[in-house]
C-alpha cells in the first residue's frame, strides 16, 4: 500500500475512528447539575419552545448547528457509491465547519428509494438545525431536491456542490482573468461536466459578466448543443447553437477551461488549442481533469488551479461554506440568496489581493504568497476569511431582507 494511502487511512482510524465528536457546554457533575440539565429542569425550556418556537435559538444548540446531508450519489468525483461511503466526506465537511467557522455540524447520510422520500426525510428533521448543507447529491436530482427543500424548510438550505463551488470558482476566475489581462465579458469558456457544480458555476459566471453563448458545456457525450434531444432541463439552458462536438472542437480558441467532471479527461496536447494566457481550473476531486505538472509542462502561460490542498490555487468550496453559513446563521437568515452569494464572491476575491499573514504562509508550507499566477485565491487556513466573508454575507442578508435579526455586535466593529 502506498505511503500516502496508508497515511490517509491511519488519519481516519487513529486515535479514535472518524473525525468528529460531541462536547458538552454545561456542567453535568452533580445531582444539582442533572436536575437542571435533565429532569426536572429541562421541562422549563421545553415549555418555552412549545409556546414560541423561536426560543429554540435561545435554549438549544440549534442556532449554531448545521446538518451536512448526503445520499452519496456523487461523492466528490468518485461517483455514486452510496450513503455510508460518503460518511468520511461529510464528517470532513463537519470538521471544516467547526475548525474554520466555529459552527457545530453533524453528518447525516440518507438511504432512500425515491427523490420524494429523500426530500421528506430532510424536511422532517430540518427544524433541529440552524441550516442544512446538502452535499454530494448528483444532478439532475439535486436541483429538484434543493428547490423543494428551500420551499419546505424554515432554515437556510444550500447545496454546497452547486453554490459553494460556484462562489469560489467565480472569485478565483475573476482574479485569474485579471492577471491574464482578460475581461470575463469577452472570454470563451469550456465547462467539462454538466452536473450540479457545472450548472451553478456557469450561472454564477454569467451573473458576473460571462456571455452564455460563449460557453461550451460538455457531458459524457460531448458538447451540449441545440440539436441534441437527450438534454435535461438544466443542460438545455446551456445548449449552444454550434457545430462543435468534441472537447478539442470546444477548446479551439477558448480562453478558459473549468473542469467539474472527472479525473484525467483533459489531454495535455489539447491545451495547445486554447488562446494565449489561458485559465485552467481542473476542480475534480480527488483527481483533477489534468494534473498541474502535465498542464504546465505543456504550456507555461496557463494559470492553473485544482480542488486540492497540495497544489497552488485551491479552488474548492471549503473557501465558502463555513463562512456563508456563519454569516447566514448569525443574522438568522431565512435563506441564502443571490445577494449573499455575490457578496461572498467579492469578499473572497478581494482578500487574495492583501498581504498574507505569516501564520498562513507557515501553514501553507512556507512558500511566498503574493497575488499572482500561483496565488489567485486565499488559503482555507486564512483566519481573515471568517471575518471578511461571514460579515459580507451577514450584511448582504440584512440589506436584502433575508435576515430575521440585526447584525451582531462583532460585525459592527
Ligand atoms: N473543487 C470543488 O470545490 C468541487 C469540485 N467538484 C467536482 O466536480 C465533479 C462533479 O461533481 P458534481 O457536479 O457534484 O457531480 P454530478 O454528478 O452532479 O455531475 C457530474 C457531471 O460530470 C460529467 N462527467 C463525469 N465524467 C465525465 C467525463 N469523463 N467526461 C465528461 N463529463 C463527465 C457528468 O456527465 P453526464 O451528465 O453525461 O453524466 C455530469 O454532467 C466531481 O469531480 C467533484 O469532485 C464538485 C463540487 C466542488
Ligand atoms: C469539494 C467538493 O465538495 C467535491 O469535490 O464534491
Ligand atoms: Mg461535494
Image (cartoon, rainbow, N blue to C red):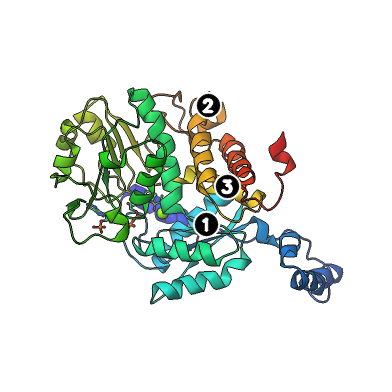
Q: Between label 1 and label 2, give the one nearer the viewer.
A: 2
116 up-or-down from 329: above or below: below
Report whether residue 105 is seen. Answer: yes
Task: For label 2, count other residues whose C-alpha is less than 10 Å away and answer few (under 14), some (14-19) or many (20+).
Answer: some
Lower sequence index among marks 3 and 1: 1
Q: Secondary structure at mark 2?
A: loop
Q: Which residue is disc 2 drawn over?
A: 356
Q: Which residue is disc 1 drawn over?
A: 19
Residue 151 in percent (x, y) is at 52, 64
Q: Which residue is disc 3 drawn over?
A: 99
Alpha-carbon span between mark 3 and mark 1? 11 Å
Lower sequence index among marks 2 and 3: 3
Residue 61 in percent (x, y) is at 68, 61
Residue at 51% across, 29% down: 350
Alpha-carbon span between mark 2 and mark 3? 19 Å
Task: For label 3, count other residues whose C-alpha is less than 10 Å away and answer few (under 14), some (14-19) or many (20+).
Answer: few
> Which one is in front, 174 or 215?
215
Amino acid at each position: 500500500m502506498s505511503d500516502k494511502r496508508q497515511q490517509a487511512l491511519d488519519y481516519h482510524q487513529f486515535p479514535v475512528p472518524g473525525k468528529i465528536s460531541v462536547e458538552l457546554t454545561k456542567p453535568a457533575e452533580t445531582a444539582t447539575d442533572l436536575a437542571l440539565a435533565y429532569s426536572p429542569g429541562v421541562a422549563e425550556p421545553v415549555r418555552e419552545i412549545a409556546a414560541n418556537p423561536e426560543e429554540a435559538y435561545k435554549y438549544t444548540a440549534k442556532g449554531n448547528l448545521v446538518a451536512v446531508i448526503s445520499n452519496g450519489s456523487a461523492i466528490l468525483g468518485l461517483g455514486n457509491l452510496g450513503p455510508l461511503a460518503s460518511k468520511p466526506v461529510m464528517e470532513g465537511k463537519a470538521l471544516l465547519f467547526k475548525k474554520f467557522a466555529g459552527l457545530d455540524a453533524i453528518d447525516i447520510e440518507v438511504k432512500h428509494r425515491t427523490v420524494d422520500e429523500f426530500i421528506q426525510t430532510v424536511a422532517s428533521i430540518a427544524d433541529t438545525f440552524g441550516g442544512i448543507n446538502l452535499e454530494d447529491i448528483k444532478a439532475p436530482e439535486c436541483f429538484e431536491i434543493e428547490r423543494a427543500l428551500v420551499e419546505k424548510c424554515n432554515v437556510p438550505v444550500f447545496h454546497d456542490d452547486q453554490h459553494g463551488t460556484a462562489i469560489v470558482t467565480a472569485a478565483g476566475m475573476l482574479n485569474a482573468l485579471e492577471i491574464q489581462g482578460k475581461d470575463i465579458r469577452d472570454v470563451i469558456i469550456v465547462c467539462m461536466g454538466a452536473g450540479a457544480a457545472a450548472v451553478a458555476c456557469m450561472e454564477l459566471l454569467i451573473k458576473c459578466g460571462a456571455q452564455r453563448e460563449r460557453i461550451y458545456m460538455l457531458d459524457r457525450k460531448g458538447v451540449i448543443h441545440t440539436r441534441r434531444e437527450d438534454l435535461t432541463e438544466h443542460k438545455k439552458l446551456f445548449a449552444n447553437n454550434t457545430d462543435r462536438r468534441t472537447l478539442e472542437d470546444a477548446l479551439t480558441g477558448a480562453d478558459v477551461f473549468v473542469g467539474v467532471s472527472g479525473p484525467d479527461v483533459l489531454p495535455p496536447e489539447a491545451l495547445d488549442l486554447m488562446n494565449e494566457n489561458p485559465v485552467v481550473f481542473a476542480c475534480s476531486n480527488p483527481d483533477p481533469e489534468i494534473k498541474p505538472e502535465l498542464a504546465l509542462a505543456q504550456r507555461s502561460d496557463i494559470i492553473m488551479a485544482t480542488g486540492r490542498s497540495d497544489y497552488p490555487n485551491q479552488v474548492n468550496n471549503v473557501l465558502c461554506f463555513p463562512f456563508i453559513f456563519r454569516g447566514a446563521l448569525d443574522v438568522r437568515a431565512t435563506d441564502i440568496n443571490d445577494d449573499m452569494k455575490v457578496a461572498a464572491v467579492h469578499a473572497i476575491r478581494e482578500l487574495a489581493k492583501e498581504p498574507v499573514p505569516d501564520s498562513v504562509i507557515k501553514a501553507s508550507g512556507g512558500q511566498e504568497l503574493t497575488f499572482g499566477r500561483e496565488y489567485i485565491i486565499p488559503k482555507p487556513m486564512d483566519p481573515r476569511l471568517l471575518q471578511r466573508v461571514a460579515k459580507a454575507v451577514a450584511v448582504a442578508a440584512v440589506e436584502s431582507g433575508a435576515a430575521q435579526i440585526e447584525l451582531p455586535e462583532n460585525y459592527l466593529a
